Image: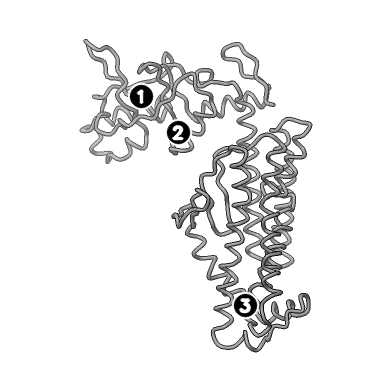
């Protein structure tokens, strides 16, 4: 998501995603369009005493719609703060809270694997939403009936925040209810297996929500939420399973060692490089400079993307030294495999050079990682150094 920071609360950066700038006026419009019907429901359900005529004339529906939409997203921020502050109490840093198309997301730098901690963190958000709803209702009660617009906004927020809490407790992982489900499942089985089971339930709920939103109510927002839940459940389940599979596995265990690496020299032409890529079926090469005094020295990394920047007719005139990357992303062989995966994901690159005391000892790529992961999934072990591994 592309976002920008608007401030911070309790030391946690608050960000707005660009999609939020689209959804806020949309919500304001939808509330404004439905204001008469909603006011009637509030009058009947909460005995609100709202003068419908006073809030439906002129620009009043759109002003009240905007106020209610802003209030809704304030409630979303408070909901995410509930999660975040509880997580911080357990020692888990929060990178940011971001408002976007489907509400809010608290970005955890690390997820708790203790089921009690996850349970408390998961329920904290809905509890805050209920408290916001109760607070809105109390303000609604003490607001004079002559202020129909204020009573409409407060009554609307009271109902909607409680509804938000209830909706979030649906066991559709990774929604709050799904995280509660995983926490309960993790009481007596491995965390990775509990995640897989919770994700399966979450995807089932996502399919149900999507079908309901498509064929029953034709609600694009609900369809979007269902799609997000399905993708997020699959992604987190894979990440947790991979983390469990690579427990105690180091980069040195799954890397391609230096003795098996294909390398190029800085004076190799780009045309020759591309020909080698075609015949050797590699898309990235460490660049090694061989010097009579210093011996072999790692000076860069060149990839197919680098070579493509040169027009085909000019590739004989350019060398690897002209196009290679000198700002190298490296990792030590003793680092754990998940660190390598996270670093490749963070920098959006496909490989890391493995360096020990400034010497190139190997290379780890996404292909290496996925091959090792497939072995673990199918056999329950990965033993390049003779040590058994288990996926749980």
Q: As displayed, is residue 252 above or below residue 200?
A: above
Answer with mark 3 or mark 1, whichever residue precedes in sequence.
Answer: 3
Tell me the tag on residue 77: none
Q: Residues within 10 Å of mark 1 (few under 14, many from 20)?
A: many
Identify which residue is drawn at 62% across, 77% down.
150
Looking at this view, is 377 or 44 the one in front? 44
Is residue 195 toward the left or the right of residue 97 in the image?
right
Q: Residues within 10 Å of mark 2 (few under 14, many from 20)?
A: some
Residue 162, given in percent of the width and then of the height, sits at 72, 62
Looking at this view, is 278 or 83 the one in front? 83
Cα gap from disc 2 to disc 3, whole angstroms: 55 Å
Q: As displayed, is residue 251 above or below residue 386?
A: below
Answer with mark 2 or mark 1, whichever residue precedes in sequence.
Answer: 1
Identify which residue is drawn at 74% across, 52% down.
205
* Closer mark to the observer between disc 3 and disc 1: 3
Residue 218, given in percent of the width and then of the height, sits at 68, 67
The local secondary structure at tag 3 comes to helix
Residue 314, given in percent of the width and then of the height, sits at 23, 37
Tell me the tag on residue 150: 3
Q: As displayed, is residue 208 above or below residue 53?
A: above
Residue 56, given in percent of the width and then of the height, sits at 62, 85
Q: Which residue is mark 2?
A: 350
Q: Residue 139, located in which quarter of the rendered image? A: bottom right
Disc 2 + disc 1, Cβ < 8 Å = no
Q: Which residue is mark 1?
A: 286
Identify which residue is drawn at 68% across, 86% down.
51
Disc 3 + disc 1, Cβ < 8 Å = no
Q: As displayed, is residue 209 above or below residue 252?
A: below
Answer with mark 2 or mark 3, whichever residue precedes in sequence.
Answer: 3
Q: Residues within 10 Å of mark 3 (few under 14, many from 20)?
A: many
Q: Quadrant of the C terminus?
A: top right
């Amino acid at each position: 998501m592309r976002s920008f920071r608007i401030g911070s609360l309790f030391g946690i950066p608050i960000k707005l995603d660009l999609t939020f700038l689209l959804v806020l006026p949309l919500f304001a419009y939808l509330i404004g369009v439905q204001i008469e019907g909603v006011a009637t429901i509030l009058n009947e359900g909460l005995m609100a005493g709202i003068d419908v005529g006073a809030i439906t004339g002129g620009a009043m529906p759109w002003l009240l719609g905007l106020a209610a939409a802003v209030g809704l997203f304030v409630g979303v921020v408070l909901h995410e703060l509930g999660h975040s502050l509880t997580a911080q109490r357990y020692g888990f840093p929060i990178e940011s809270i971001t408002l976007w198309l489907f509400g809010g997301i608290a970005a955890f730098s690390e997820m708790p694997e203790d089921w009690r901690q996850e349970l408390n963190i998961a329920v904290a958000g809905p509890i805050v939403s209920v408290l916001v709803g109760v607070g809105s209702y109390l303000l609604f009660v003490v607001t004079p009936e002559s202020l129909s617009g204020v009573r409409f906004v407060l009554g609307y927020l009271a109902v909607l925040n409680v509804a938000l809490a209830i909706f979030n407790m649906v066991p559709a992982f990774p929604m709050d209810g799904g995280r509660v489900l995983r926490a309960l499942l993790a009481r007596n089985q491995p965390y990775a297996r509990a995640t897989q089971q919770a994700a399966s339930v979450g995807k089932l709920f996502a399919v149900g929500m999507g079908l309901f939103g498509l064929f029953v109510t034709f609600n694009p927002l609900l369809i979007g939420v269902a799609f997000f839940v399905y993708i997020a459940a699959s992604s987190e389940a894979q990440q947790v399973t991979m983390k469990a599979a690579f427990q105690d596995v180091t980069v040195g265990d799954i890397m391609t060692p230096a003795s098996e690496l294909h390398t190029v020299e800085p004076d190799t032409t780009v045309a020759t490089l591309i020909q080698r890529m075609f015949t050797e079926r590699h898309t990235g090469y460490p660049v090694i400079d061989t010097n009579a005094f210093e011996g072999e020295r790692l000076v860069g990394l060149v990839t197919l993307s680098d070579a493509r920047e040169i027009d085909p007719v000019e590739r004989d005139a350019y060398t690897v030294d002209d196009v290679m990357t000198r700002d190298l992303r490296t990792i030590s062989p003793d680092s754990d495999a998940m660190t390598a995966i996270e670093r490749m994901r963070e920098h959006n690159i496909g490989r890391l050079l493995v360096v020990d005391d400034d010497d190139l000892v190997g290379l780890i790529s996404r292909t290496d990682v996925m091959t090792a992961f497939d072995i673990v999934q199918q056999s329950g072990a990965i033993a390049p150094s003779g040590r058994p591994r288990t996926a749980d």
